[in-house]
Image: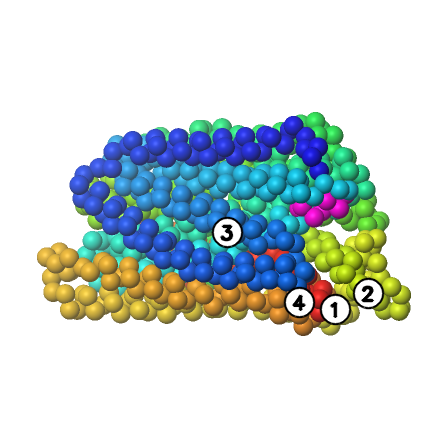
Amino acid sequence: MNNIPTVFWLVPVASFCALGMAWFFFQSMMKEDEGMPRMKEIASHVRKGAMAYLKQQYKVVFYVFVVLALIFAFMAYVLHVQNPWVPFAFLTGGLFSGLAGFFGMKTATYASGRTANGARKGLDKGLQIAFRSGAVMGLVVVGLGLLDIAVWFLILSSVYTEGSIALITITTTMLTFGMGASTQALFARVGGGIYTKAADVGADLVGKVEANIPEDDPRNPATIADNVGDNVGDVAGMGADLYESYCGSILSTAALGATAFAMNGDMQLKAVIAPMIIAAVGIFLSLIGIFLVRTKEGASMKDLLHSLGLGTNVSAFLIAIATFVILYLLGLDNWLGVSFSVVVGLAAGVIIGQATEYYTSQSYKPTQKIAEASNTGAATVIIKGIGTGMISTCVPVITISVAIMLSYLCANGFDMSMSAASVSRGLYGIGIAAVGMLSTLGITLATDAYGPIADNAGGNAEMSELEPMVRQRTDALDALGNTTAATGKGFAIGSAALTALALLASYVEEVKIAMVRAVSEGTQYIDALGKTFNPETANMEDFMTFFQVNLMNPKVLVGAFVGAMAAFLFCGLTMGAVGRAAGAMVEEVRRQFREIKGILEGKATPDYGRCVEISTRSAQREMIFPSFLAILIPIVVGCILGVAGVLGLLVGGLAAGFTLAVFMANAGGAWDNAKKMVEEGNFGGKGSDCHKATIVGDTVGDPFKDTSGPSLNILIKLMSMVSIVMAGLTVAFI
């Protein structure tokens, strides 16, 4: 397959452009003044702690990847149930995902002190430094993601050159590096989430509630660990998370395009590269949006939201227009309908983002009502927050449901016949809708990554004892960051739902390839009527019939129940992990207050290093079991229940996981901003009983929104990716 069109080269060009601009923004940030010696010292402590944690985490993940790569190599070269390129693609996916998290966190740890110093000059200066530093993360993710995709496409295109099956083999093999990215992302999200929330809960419960000292007070032994946690969980973890979301949407759509247009070689190639081109153009349009973000001194929360919204909305509008031009120039069949599928994805992302903002921002009634509930204690704050989170699932679920139907129908020309060609092209529309939702991830992720930087800037300002106006400005940026982070999580889980649905079709295609490979080695498949089943000529409907994938098959139903259970089990394990780690942190902070005389009077220095060590050890120990569970469940289900059971598993996991993730992210974000609202002087302000009640709510919400909730969208896609990679093993048990 050497006839790669010239337009494809826009993909690597865009990736290098993104990485170049990320370097430019990083260098610009580094030229800013980091402030007074005390500010530099605090930033240095946080930076060293974050890098030490990441180094330890990557050691653990390295061993996991080596073991998994050896298993894939055994499957490929000994059992011959796997493509021989799979082990290498898997490793590069994990490597690039880890690099994205590392570069983003390195930038964030240098940017927080500079943001605090910038806030001394004005709100706009602080926003500019924090946001463009967050843009480094966004641009590194899309740059490395597209680079990895482009390189593997070129390599595999030079190896597989014959017929329509070549592109199907290429794209399904490339999905493997999506599994590598998902595996790395899950460890990063779970480990980082446990670390940051253990420190945060310990710092809040003992420092703010029991000792009645301000947040980020230097007398609090857990405060450095808390600031380190913001970086390892909300920056490095989030970067790895959205890297795999971005790559997964492009790769699954490319694989669906190879299948949907398999009978037309020229059109098949166009369908495969279309999502890559849309993502490449999205990089350039994200840069335009990044330069539009600015604000004025004394801006309100709505003004700040409008400032960020301007950048993201302009980028989204431009990519919507550009999509029509791209697909028209490519000459893709039904280019108009497929373009509308992309617009549907973009619109769904905007609606989910707006709904998330409504339910989590203190500018709107749901969060205000949670803050008001603090008048009657912590219990009512928690009850109100849970109820708000549950109600908040309605708009995203309905939006995704409508988006699935519209993108499906637009792409197949509103063909309701359910023929093989109609279904394949409809599924391609769903996949490309996910690409549309994430096409401007460069700026969307910038609005997300900027939040932890602003949070750390506030911590630096508090510990450096800067003038109150500086902390007021960083708190405004931090509150905005809580809302944009919740919005970013909404985008991530929305795209995960669309991508996971597209991956279901990719799984069936991988099963087909595994069966064709088995037939070439002498295996025969007999259907329910006793006839020989030929996987090479069968379409998707034939496969569904052969494997009895229908609601009357108990294997499908059992798989669906196990998938739904997996989402709750995973959340339970990660919540429990945060609880145990936070308990150890609470005891340590209490011990230091009790045994180190003079801490609360400011006459003695707390042992910050001990708290950092507790968070690090807890995270490394606690992240292993939940992460391995996500990998093992699809394998076990595949071996016991077969293809029908796996498809049920993926559907059940998707439905339960999506709804649960939205609930947890929105409830957590609302609790956090309810606390911020009280801290601004409402309902008694800081130190009041209402404040303590909202702190308890925020403490419950911390693992909701920063550990369990965001990890679910990785779980959904990782189970799909594992199922695809292990399809050969599942087929061997037929």
Q: Quadrant of residue 633?
A: bottom right
Mark 3 crowdedness (10 Å alpha carbons): few <14, some 14-19, many ≥20 = many
Question: Which circle, 3 or 4, is nearer the viewer?
Answer: 3
Upstream in sequence: badge 4 or badge 1: 4
* Residue at which label 3 appears: 94
Upstream in sequence: badge 3 or badge 1: 3
Question: Which circle, 4 or 1, is nearer the viewer?
Answer: 1
* Percent coordinates x, y for residue 473 in the rendering: 30, 40
Q: Nearer the viewer, residue 557 or 24?
A: 24
Q: Amino acid at mark 3?
A: Gly
* Residue at which label 1 appears: 734
Q: Is label 3 in a helix, a strand or a loop?
A: helix
Q: Which mark is residue 397?
A: none
In three-dimensional space, the C-alpha distance between marks 2 and 1, rounded to whole angstroms, equals 9 Å
Q: Amino acid at mark 1?
A: Ile
In three-dimensional space, the C-alpha distance between marks 4 and 2, rounded to whole angstroms, equals 18 Å
Give the residue displayed 36% in from the left and 65% down from the top. 618
Q: Which mark is residue 638?
A: 4
In three-dimensional space, the C-alpha distance between marks 2 and 3, rounded to whole angstroms, equals 36 Å
Q: Find the magenta span and give its range.
A: 164-171
Colouring mode (rainbow / by chain / secondary structure / one colour): rainbow
Mark 1 crowdedness (10 Å alpha carbons): few <14, some 14-19, many ≥20 = some
In three-dimensional space, the C-alpha distance between marks 3 and 4, rounded to whole angstroms, equals 24 Å
Q: Amino acid at mark 4?
A: Gly
* Residue at which label 2 appears: 525
Q: Is residue 340 left or right of residue 134?
A: right
Upstream in sequence: badge 2 or badge 3: 3
